[in-house]
Amino acid sequence: MTTGILSFGAYVPRKRLQRSAIYAANAWFAAGLKGLAKGERAIGDWDEDTITMAVEAARDALVGIDRSAVTGVSLASTTFPFADRQNAGIVKEALVLQDESGTMDVGGSLRAATTALIQALRSSAAGAGMQLCVASDMRKSRSASEAELLNGDAAAAIVVGEGNVVARFVGSHSVSADFVDHYRASGQAFDYGWESRWIRDVGYHGILVDALQSGLVAMGVKADQVDRLIIPITVRGVAASVGRKAGFRDEAIVDTMSSNVGDSGAAHPLLLLASVLEAGAAGQKILLVGFGQGVDMILLETTDALGKLAPRVGVKGALARRAEDTNYMRWLAHRGLLDIERGLRAEVDLRQPLTALWRQRKAVFGLVGGRCTHTGTVQFPKSDVSVNPNDHARFTQEDYPLADRRARIVTYTADALAYSPAPPTYYGLVDFDGGGRMKIEFADVEEQDVEVGREVAMMFRIHAIDEQRKFKRYFWKAAPVVSGA
Amino acid sequence: MASGIKDKVAILGMGCAKFGERWDKDAGELMLEAFDEALLDAGIETSQIDAAWLGVAYDVANLGSSGIPMSFALRLPNVGVTKVENYCASGTESLRGAVYAVASGAADIALAMGVEKLKDTGYGGLPTRTLGTNLDMIGVEGSGPGNFAQLASAYRNVHGVGKGDLKRAMAHVSVKSHANGLKNPKAHLRSAIDIDQVLNAPMIAEPLGLYDCCGVSDGAACAIVTTPEIARSLGKRDLVTIKALQIATSNGWEQQHAGGWNGSYFHTTRIAATKAYKEAGITDPREQIGLTEVHDCFSITELVTMEDLFLSGEGEAWRDVLDGVFDADGKVPCQIDGGLKCFGHPIGASGLRMLYENYLQLLGRAGDRQRKTPPSLALSHNLGGQPSENVSAVAIVGLADA
C-alpha cells in the first residue's frame, strides 16, 4: 500500500486587516515600519482562535472522507488556548470523530506541524490508519512591532493515510539546532526576537541551506528534480534566496502568501502545502520545509488522484471569502490588547459547569441533534420526548449531526443592546435543510447578509469567554453563504 | 375543557404604586405603596388576608428568594405567601394563584402582588443573567429588543408588508401610547412624541428604535380578591369579576420544529385567547371587548398581539393600527393608561398594573383618561419570554352583570 496524503483543507479568517491601517496608527512611533506596510494580513474575528480555525480547516480537509476511518488527530500550534486540556481533543469532538482516536497537541516550535506530519506519515505507513494533521496559529504581537505586520492568522489540515493518495510520501529528513531567532516564554503573550540580519545569514542561509543539502542527499533526490519547494518564511526574498543557494530552480519556489495572509506560524507550512496541492498536477515532486530550532523536510510526489479529489474551499476559496478591514483599534480590542470600556452589561459572570458540558458535549461541540426514528422529525437539541406536535414520541431519537447541513433564516435581528465584543449581535431562527430548527448567533455577517430565507452554513466559534476563570466556551454559529466562495 | 372560573371571584380592591425611577424606595416600600391603596379601596385590614402570592422575576436586583420578604414588608398575618416567577407574565401568574385560591374555597380573601425593582442594576434595559445551565452553552444571550425585533422580519416576510409601512405602523403604536400616558399621573414617561421622533430614533435592535421599546422602571401593583358574596357582604356594590384567566406556555414547537411556526405571531397568545374567550363566553371579541391592556414591551409586540387576540385579521393589524382602531378614541382602545411604553416594565408588576387600569375603567374611576362609554368587558394580556418561547397570559374582567 502507498502511504501519503489523502486530502487537504485550509481556513483563513475572512477579515484582512490592511497593513497600511496598522502602520498609520503606529507611524508616529515606528516610522521605520513603512517598508512592511503593504498588502494585508488575515485576522481572526473576536470569536475565533486556534481551535476554531483548526476545526474549520479540518472540516474542509474531511470533505469526501469517511470520518469514522480517522484514527488519530494532531493539532500543531504555538498558541494553544489551553495549556492543560488537550486542544486536539476539542477539535476531535467538534468533528464528531470516533472516541477510539488517538489525539495529541504538538507545539513548542514553528516546526510543530511538519514534525507532526512526519510522525503521521510514518505511523500510517506502519499501519496506524488514517491520521488527521491540523495546524493552526493565532499569534499575538505588540503594537508597532514587525510581527504585527508580518504575521497572519490561519489554519490548514492534511489527511494522511494509505491507498488512493493524492501525494505519495517519498521521504523525510530532520535537523535539530537550538538556534534562538525568537522565543516566547511559557505564559507570555509576545515573542522576543533577535536581529533579522543574523537570522538571515546564520539561520536561513546557514542552518536551513545546509539542512536542505544534507536532506536531499539523505532522501536521494537532486535539487533540480524538485518541482515545488515550500519554504514557509515570509520575510521578503528569503524563500527565493535560500532555494537558489541550495540549488533549487527559481520556478520551484512557492509564493509564501506574505502579501495576502501573513506568516501563520506553525500553520504556515501546511497552509502552503494545501495551496500547492490544490494548484498541482500529477507527478510533481514537492519538498515541504519546516523551520524552527532546526529543520524538517518532507518529500512528496503527487499522483493522478489529485485531480479527482472532491471540491473543497481550500486556500483559494478561503482567500476569496474576504472582507477588507481597516479597523486596527477593533482588532486590538478583540485580541485583548486594548482595554476598552465594555460597560456594566459585560460584567455578567457565568462559569461553565463542567459536569453539564460533559453531558452535553455532542450537542455543544458537534452540533449533534436528534432524529426521531418513528417520525423522522429532526430537532436540536436532542431530547427524550420529541418536539413533533403530532407525535411526542419518547426515547426514539438517534444522533443527527447538523454541522455540515445548510440552513435558512426564518427570523433575524441585529441587536445593539446585548453585550457583544462586536456589536450589533446578529442572531435569529434558522431551519436546517432536512429538518431541525434552532435559535443561533450569526458570524461573519454584515447588514446586507441577513434576510428571511437566506442560506447560512454552520461554523465552529467561541461562544463566550469566562474572563474570571479563563475558560472559553465553544459552540456553533451561522455564517451567510456567500455565492462564489 | 374545565367549566372555568367566570364570575366566581371578584376584585375587592386594587392598588398601584407610582411607576418610574424610584431612587427613593426599595421593592418592599413599593409593595407597601400599592398595598395601602388596595387596602383602602377594599376596606379591609391586613389581618383579613388569608393567603398571598408575589410575582417577581429578577433576583439580581430585588427581594431575594421566597415569599418571606413580602410577608416582612407588609407584616402579613403569618399566612401562606408564595413567590411565583414566570418571566414577564409573573404578575398575572401571581393573580392566578390568588384567584384560584378564592375560587376553590381555600381562601376567603387573597392578595396578588407584583413588584420589580429594576433601577438598582446600574444600567438601562433588563438585567443580564444566566439562561440556565444548558442554554448558556447552546443558546443566544440576546436582549429583549433583539428577541422581539425578530417578529418584524418574519411579519414583513409572511404578510408582504414593506419595511417602511411596518415601521410607520409600529411608530403609531408608540405615539398613541405616549399620548395616553401623558394623562396618567402614575406613568413613568409622561411626554407626547410624534411619528418623526420615533422613526428617527437610534436603533436598539433592527428594526426597533428607542421609541419602539418600553421603558424600564420600578413599580408595584396589587389586587385583593374575594368571592362576589363576601364582596357584597363587605358593602361593595359595583363589582368587577374575573371572567376568564388563561395562561399558555410554549413547549418548544415554535423554536425547535422546522417549518412550523413562521415567526410572525405568538402561538401561545392565540391559544390563551381562544380559551379565555370560551371561558368568558365571548364570541366576537372585536365587538364585545371594550378595552385592552396588552404586553407592549415593544411596538411590534402590541401590533401582532392585536391579531393573536383576534381583534384584527391576520396580516391586517398594521392597517388597523394606522387607522386608529386601537387609539383611545378608537373602536377598541389599547393601552389607554399609556401601557408598558409609558409605565415602563417592572416585570412582576406589569400584569397587575394592566388589571388595575381595566378595573378603574370598568368602574368609571379613570379620571382624565376615562373612556367615555365605560367598557363592560376589558382584557389584559401579559407575556413573558420571547416570541419563540414564551408564557402568554390573558385575563378578562368585567362588571359582574356583564
Image (spheres, coloured by chain):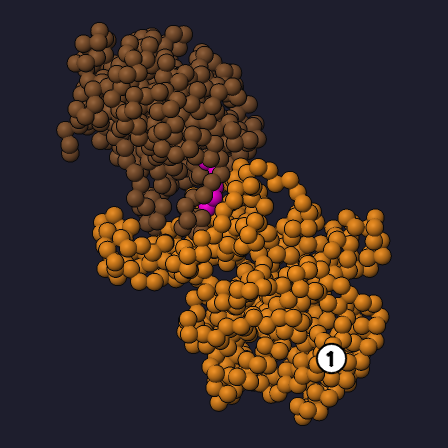
Chain colours: A orange, B brown
The answer to whether one can see residue B3 in this image is yes
Q: Nearer the viewer, residue A138 or A315?
A: A138
Q: Is residue A130 left or right of residue B109?
A: right
Q: Is residue A319 magenta?
A: no
Vertically, is A89 above or below A124?
A: above
**Tag 1, which chain?**
A
The amino acid type found where label 1 is placed reads Ala
Quarter placement of the N terminus of chain B:
top left
Q: Nearer the viewer, residue B83 or B288?
A: B83
Considering the whole magenta stretch, tell me its main secondary structure: loop
Task: Name which quarter of the figure residue A211 lies in.
Answer: bottom right
The residue under the point 37% across, 41% down is B388
Vertically, is A72 above or below B263?
A: below
**Label 1 belongs to which residue?**
A177
The residue under the point 77% across, 71% down is A181
Task: Name which quarter of the figure residue B200 lies in.
Answer: top right
Give residue B326's position: percent from left, percent from top. Answer: 37, 20
Give residue A247's position: percent from left, percent from top. Answer: 77, 85
Q: Is residue B23 left or right of residue A406?
A: right
Q: What segment carries the magenta color?
A: B140-145
Q: Nearer the viewer, residue A341 or B197?
A: A341
Vertically, is B197 above or below A255?
A: above
The residue under the point 54% across, 54% down is A471
